[in-house]
Amino acid sequence: MGSKRRLLLVSNSTLHGSGYLDHCEEQIKSFLGSQVKTVLFVPYALHDRDGYAKIARTKYESMGYKLDSIHEQPDPVAAVQAAEAVFIGGGNTFRLLKALYDNKIVSEIKKRVLEDGMPYIGSSAGTNVSTISISTTNDMPIVQPPTFQAIGLVPFNINPHFLDPDPNSTHQGETRETRIKQYHEEADTPPVLGLREGGILHVEGDTATLKGTTKARLFLKGKEPTEHDQGTDFSFLLDPKNY
Amino acid sequence: MGSKRRLLLVSNSTLHGSGYLDHCEEQIKSFLGSQVKTVLFVPYALHDRDGYAKIARTKYESMGYKLDSIHEQPDPVAAVQAAEAVFIGGGNTFRLLKALYDNKIVSEIKKRVLEDGMPYIGSSAGTNVSTISISTTNDMPIVQPPTFQAIGLVPFNINPHFLDPDPNSTHQGETRETRIKQYHEEADTPPVLGLREGGILHVEGDTATLKGTTKARLFLKGKEPTEHDQGTDFSFLLDPKNY
């Protein structure tokens, strides 16, 4: 029997020229369907949790879902245990992962998603923490989580907001591609899927499909990166035996 | 009696349109003077340590100094203990800090700089690790150091390669300024000096001066960032009682 996992991993919550989650609204509605009534929101990646929950609530209500923010719940673990679906929003990945550990919900989310099939929506930092580790986040290490290991709903890494080099830039900081290649210089490093803004990885059980509006760039240790169109079947990434 | 500390903290090793360390060559020669004969190089931030040492050696020899790379020494701690001056080059800050701890030279470098007045030159990641922590690095967390606390030669943070927002960008990833402001949302966070490419912070004892070719941007917790010309006296940053 295959995995029950259901994931909608979004590169970014706001696409240039549109509002919060507008670009993935149809994907979210189709993913959650009509059976889910209430989504549990995790606002830990931003400092202003109240303000963040307000923005997320407005959007989810407009899509026909009730939204509970975990920071308003008395017991975060119980909130995850009772959730119909979870949405983890973007912000700072280190702050988010530390708060997930501080609130002891890393293993609980993993259990609910992998064993119960609770739908998981992640955006940006919320996508980073769904993967094997946060080692390919773009964020500053403003706080120190106990480990870089993340929830581990998939066995590889994602780089959200993946950015191609600007050929006109005179800036000497490393490009995103250089940074990911440096990651692959280290031992035992899994693939990294570079999700450009507008990109979405949709996982249903043991099937992973690229959705959204942009191509993705895949980095495998020791190989040249490759470009992939929307609709690409990335299921092989779900099994570490394949790399 | 004031501190013996002597630091030359460079934003970046290569400036657009010139060669390795060319833009700070005169500053390095003036900083090291003629008394120093041999510089101890720390190449830990890059994977190819041999190749990196070769590049650094060529440049330092052209300036009239011998260069020993610590990765070619049998005992890194003894190498630091015997060094006349140290140069820590750029690359990945997490990889660098982890290797400094793995080789047990963090406290030894601190002791040599603060107590013996051993001159310290840092570039990019080598500048990050000289400060209180690596919490304002731009690099990916490709490996996990035991702590984000760094050598602590100064009590504040530096953001090297500081980059102004591109007004024409449609990319929705956080700007550098947003990331630094997120750092200051956390408790007990010291100032962050944004050193643009071409910028150098020169510290002699209890005096800190901005040198190089670009203005710097200073971020203090709870305040609007401020712009500072070359020649600015940043000595107040050296005493945490001032913030």
Image (spheres, coloured by chain):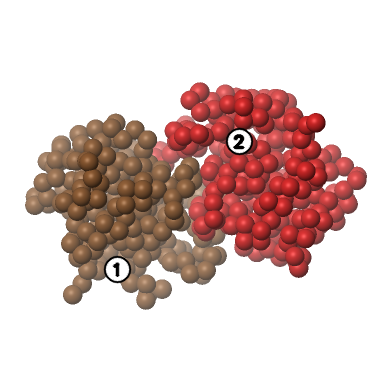
Chain colours: A red, B brown
Is A129 situated left or right of B38 in this image?
A: right
User: Badge 1 is on which residue?
Assistant: B235
Point out residue A184 in the picture as x, y percentages from the top left corner: 48, 33
Q: Mark 1 to mark 2: distance in Å?
A: 46 Å
- Residue A195 shows which numbered tag? none
- Residue A156 shows which numbered tag? 2
The type of residue carrying mark 2 is: Phe
Between circles 1 and 2, the one closer to the viewer is 2
For the N terminus of chain B, the quadrant is bottom left
Q: Dot 1, crowdedness within 10 Å: few (<14), some or many (≥20)?
A: some
Q: Dot 2, crowdedness within 10 Å: few (<14), some or many (≥20)?
A: many
User: Helix or strand or loop: what does disc 2 sit on?
Assistant: loop
Q: Which residue is drawn at 18% across and 62% down?
A: B116
Residue A34, relative to residue B215: is it above or below? above
Point out residue A235 in the picture as x, y percentages from the top left corner: 70, 27
Quarter of image, res A228: top right
Quarter of image, res B238: bottom left
* Closer to the camera in the image, B154 or B225: B154
